[in-house]
Image: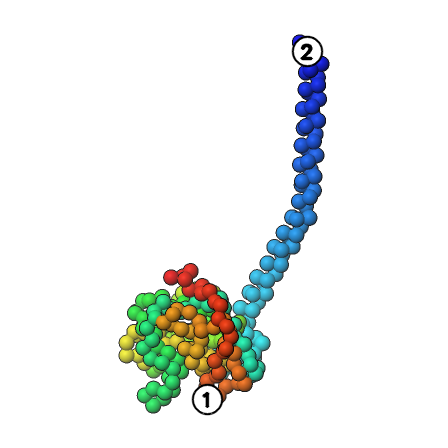
Amino acid sequence: MNFSFIKKTLGIALLSTISMSTFAQDLIARQAPSDKRLKDVKNVKLNNTAVLSADLNDPAAHIYTDWTSNLRGCAGVVPSNYKIDLRNFCMPTSSRKVNSLYGPRWGRQHEGIDIKVYIGDTIRSAFDGKVRICKYNGSGYGYYVVIRHPNGLETLYGHLSKQIVKENQIVRAGQPIGLGGNTGRSSGSHLHFETRVLGQPIDPALIFDFARQDVVSDYYIVQNGFSNGNVARSSATKNTTSTESAHR
């Protein structure tokens, strides 16, 4: 038996094992800073989540100074050329049929638009936000929900057959908040949908395009305050991806 050959082979194997072990240790050592960076990134993400959660607890506190259950009891001043971020939205309904537009109707101002839905259809929150009002008005909206959003908008959903959220509840864009109905002052099942800032109505058609199931632009700019309950249309370039498709 060639003991010299065996000894030489065992020596090479031992050296290889040591080298591999050293390489593994070096690799772990080189990964350590990377792991620390990943931990830092994770902490940043958690911090951002905490900030977002705080925003939803008191949405749009930069322009609203109160939190009431009165539809038009919102105090505050809209800054000139106030930009409303419309990204990360969800269409409140997949229906594309608008039955009635914003504006004068039957001798009074129709402060929203009516979208054809059927009783029991799912109605969703247009953006992340917090439910400010969840009430019943037999001579008007019927069962309705008002949500305040961090972007400064408030959205109203009227004539519901059922509310499935509560006041002060935090909701996410696309989350079901009620079911389509025919309650209150209504002649047929539909969703009455309003968009407001500080209690002042804005034509929802300037923000949402129900026929295309999309928003008009990434941003909506309130230019030089309000004029007769309406504001100028944003000229921002649109490049938006809807979250609505994830909830169909």
The residue to which callout 1 is attached is 228
Using the image, determine if residue 54 lies above or below residue 81: above
Q: Is residue 219 left or right of residue 9?
A: left
Q: Amino acid at mark 1?
A: Asn
Answer yes or no: is residue 209 visible: yes
Q: Quadrant of the C terminus?
A: bottom left
State the residue at coordinates (50%, 72%).
Answer: 237
Q: Is residue 159 left or right of residue 88?
A: left
The residue to which callout 2 is attached is 2
Answer yes or no: is residue 86 visible: no
Q: Looking at the image, which is closer to me, 59 or 136? A: 59
- In the rendered image, residue 155, in percent from the top left (x then y), is placed at 44, 75
- In the rendered image, residue 161, in percent from the top left (x then y), is placed at 33, 71
Task: Give the number of the disc on residue 114.
Answer: none
- In the rendered image, residue 175, in percent from the top left (x then y), is placed at 43, 64
Q: Secondary structure at mark 2?
A: loop
State the residue at coordinates (34%, 71%).
Answer: 96
Using the image, determine if residue 71 lies above or below residue 57: below
How does the figure colour the protein chain or chains?
rainbow
State the residue at coordinates (30%, 79%).
Answer: 186
Q: Amino acid at mark 2?
A: Asn
Q: Looking at the image, which is closer to me, 125 or 178? A: 125
State the residue at coordinates (58%, 76%).
Answer: 62
Q: Secondary structure at mark 1?
A: loop
Determine the CA span between mark 1 and mark 2. Answer: 104 Å
Q: Is residue 13 left or right of residue 134?
A: right
Give the total number of marks visible in the rendering: 2
